[in-house]
């Protein structure tokens, strides 16, 4: 394992996410499959993560994760506004950085990075 990303849904209703699939760039990571939290091994480096569900998708988040660290991302619902996009089953979702944790203590962690 070089690095990992962990996604949790917090207070989002899991019933609204039955079709949700997470992508790292264009590569499919997987689904929640009824779990509140999932963790996938990924290469260390800079990545863009987003979720697709039906015809909708979440706003993407860019992040950088160091070797042997796990980037922790939380999926949240937000109120629709003029700048919102990514409607999923009638609600808006976005991915937010919630921190990082070492897989191997003593190394630098993960940080949010620009999308471009």
Image (tube, rainbow, N blue to C red):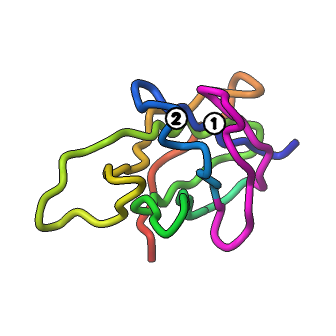
Q: Main secondary structure of the magenta part?
A: strand
Tell me where residue 3 appears, x and y as whole percent: 76, 44
Tell me where residue 53 appears, x and y as whole percent: 54, 58
Q: Quick check: 114 above or below 40? A: below
Specify few, some or many for label 1: CA neighbours under 10 Å numbering under 14, 14-19, or 20 or more: some
- Front-most of 80 and 100? 80
Tell me where residue 66 appears, x and y as whole percent: 67, 46
Q: Quick check: 101 above or below 69? A: above
Q: Which residues are magenta?
A: 23-43
Give the label on residue 107, or none: none
Q: Quick check: 48 above or below 101? A: below
Residue where numbered disc 1 is placed: 6
User: In the image, what residue occupies the spot 51% across and 39% down?
Assistant: 73
User: In the image, what residue occupies the spot 73% across and 53% down?
Assistant: 44
Task: Indicate whether residue 29 is drawn in magenta.
Answer: yes
Residue where numbered disc 2 is placed: 15
> How many angstroms separate mark 1 from mark 2 (CA)?
20 Å
Going by the image, does 110 lie left or right of 105?
Answer: left
């Amino acid at each position: 394992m070089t690095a990992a990303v962990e996604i949790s849904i917090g207070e989002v209703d899991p019933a609204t996410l039955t079709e949700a699939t997470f992508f790292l760039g264009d590569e499919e990571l997987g689904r929640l499959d009824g779990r509140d939290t999932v963790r996938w091994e990924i290469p260390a480096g800079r990545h863009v993560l987003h979720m697709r569900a039906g015809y909708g998708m979440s706003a993407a988040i860019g992040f950088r994760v160091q070797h042997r660290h796990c980037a922790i991302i939380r999926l949240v619902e937000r109120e629709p506004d003029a700048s919102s996009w990514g409607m999923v089953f009638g609600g808006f979702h976005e991915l937010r950085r919630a921190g990082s944790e070492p897989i191997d203590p003593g190394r630098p962690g993960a940080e949010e990075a620009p999308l471009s």
